[in-house]
Image (tube, helix red, strand yellow):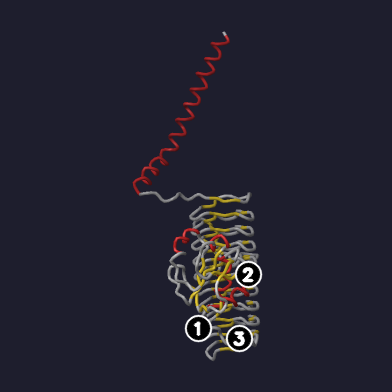
């Protein structure tokens, strides 16, 4: 595959950036500040990495106006270098583009609808009544279950599994190993015997959603599990049945969301967060890593419950003190009662 080459003038025009340097200088790739060479573009978004800027060998750097002051190298000056990097990253992406058509080894049901511009990879299975929209790419060995729908521009990596009645919006990206529409964890207990509950709902995914590798989204028990527009889910996340996630919420890896929990829009859920079932989280909430959410969150803001790292010896002391908190609380209550009695007696004596 030939390298993609752009002049700094072309990139400045695309970004609406101010160029400091020669417009005809070319770059053919992206790299970090520390590793970029004279043919590559880089960026500075985190102040922690500013120390690497003076020595960077990059052909050009995406910088804010403040960081560009005093910088002697080539610069594309933009308000948000990280956003500019995100936009330009697609220009240098070498991911293969699938060609339209159905691979000879794919199995497509006679009544499935596959748009002529879609690509169906090797050994993929498209079951009865499924609908594959324009420009969709279905990776090798991916299964699209009965009556499932994939909207325009969707991209499914190899070995994705969609059960029946999964509805996916436009421009949705799903990485390898993801499973959508598996049966929710529903059982009724009678004297120690578990009776399985049929999960007769589906899964509905909005537009512009991304779902990471090995993430699972269970189907609803009665109504659908709902994922809003623009939601971003990292790898290895568990979304249980009937969960609802609002538009533009992002969730990092290894989170576990229990059944029927409702998460609002524009939330950020950090890695390893757990949420119990049947609670609600309002819009614009940030939950820090490893937090356990056990009740409703009704006010926007940042929430934490995990303890920060300490040296092991200090942590053991803290853990010992935590075990003593209940006894300490009881002793404090006793002292408060004794203090109140002494104060009351003193007041009585004073009045006499």
Q: Residue furthest left?
A: 313
Instruction: Give coordinates of residue 197: x percent, y percent.
Output: 58, 64
Please indicate whether residue 150 sits to the left or right of residue 276 in the image.
Answer: right
Q: Please identify the quarter of the rendering in which residue 132 is found.
A: bottom right
Mark 3: which secondary structure?
loop
* Mark 2: secondary structure: strand
Residue at image mark 1: 3
Residue 14 image point, x, y percent? 62, 75
The residue beneath circle 2 is 205
Q: Residue at x 45, y 74 (%)?
A: 37
Of the numbered discs 1 and 3, the one sitting upstream in the chain is 1
Q: Between residues 8 and 263, which one lies in front from this camera angle?
A: 8
- Which one is earlier in the sequence, the residue at label 2 or at label 3? 3
Residue 144: horizontal and vertical position, in percent? Answer: 58, 79
Q: Which residue is mark 3?
A: 109
The answer to the question of whether label 1 and label 3 lie on touching residues, with beta carbons closer than 8 A, is no
């Amino acid at each position: 595959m030939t390298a993609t080459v752009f002049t700094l003038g072309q990139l400045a025009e695309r970004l609406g950036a101010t160029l400091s340097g020669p417009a005809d200088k070319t770059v053919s790739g992206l790299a970090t500040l520390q590793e970029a060479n004279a043919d590559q573009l880089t960026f500075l978004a985190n102040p922690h990495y500013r120390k690497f800027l003076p020595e960077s060998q990059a052909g050009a750097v995406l910088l804010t106006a403040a960081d560009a002051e005093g910088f002697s190298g080539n610069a594309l000056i933009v308000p948000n270098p990280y956003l500019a990097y995100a936009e330009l990253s697609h220009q240098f992406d070498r991911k293969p583009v699938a060609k339209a058509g159905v691979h000879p080894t794919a199995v497509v049901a006679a009544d499935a609808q596959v748009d002529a511009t879609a690509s169906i990879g090797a050994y993929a299975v498209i079951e009865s009544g499924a609908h594959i929209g324009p420009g969709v790419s279905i990776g090798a060995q991916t299964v699209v279950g009965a009556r499932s729908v994939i909207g325009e521009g969707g991209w499914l990596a190899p070995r994705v599994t969609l059960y029946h009645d999964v509805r996916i919006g436009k421009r949705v990206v799903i990485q390898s190993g993801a499973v959508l529409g598996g049966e929710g964890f529903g059982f009724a207990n009678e004297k120690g015997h578990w009776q399985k509950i049929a999960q007769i709902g589906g899964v509905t995914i909005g537009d512009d959603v991304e779902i990471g590798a090995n993430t699972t989204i269970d189907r609803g028990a009665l109504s659908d599990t709902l994922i809003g527009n623009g939601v971003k889910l990292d790898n290895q996340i568990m979304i249980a049945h009937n969960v609802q996630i609002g538009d533009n919420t992002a969730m990092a890896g290894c989170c576990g969301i229990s059944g029927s929990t409702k998460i609002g829009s524009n939330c950020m859920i950090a890695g390893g967060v757990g949420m119990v079932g049947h609670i609600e989280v309002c819009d614009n909430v940030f939950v820090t890593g490893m937090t356990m959410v056990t009740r409703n969150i009704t006010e926007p803001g940042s929430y934490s419950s995990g303890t920060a790292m300490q040296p092991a010896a200090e942590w053991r002391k803290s853990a010992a003190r935590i075990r003593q908190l209940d006894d300490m609380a009881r002793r404090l209550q006793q002292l408060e009662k004794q203090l109140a009695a002494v104060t009351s007696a003193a007041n009585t004596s004073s009045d006499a």
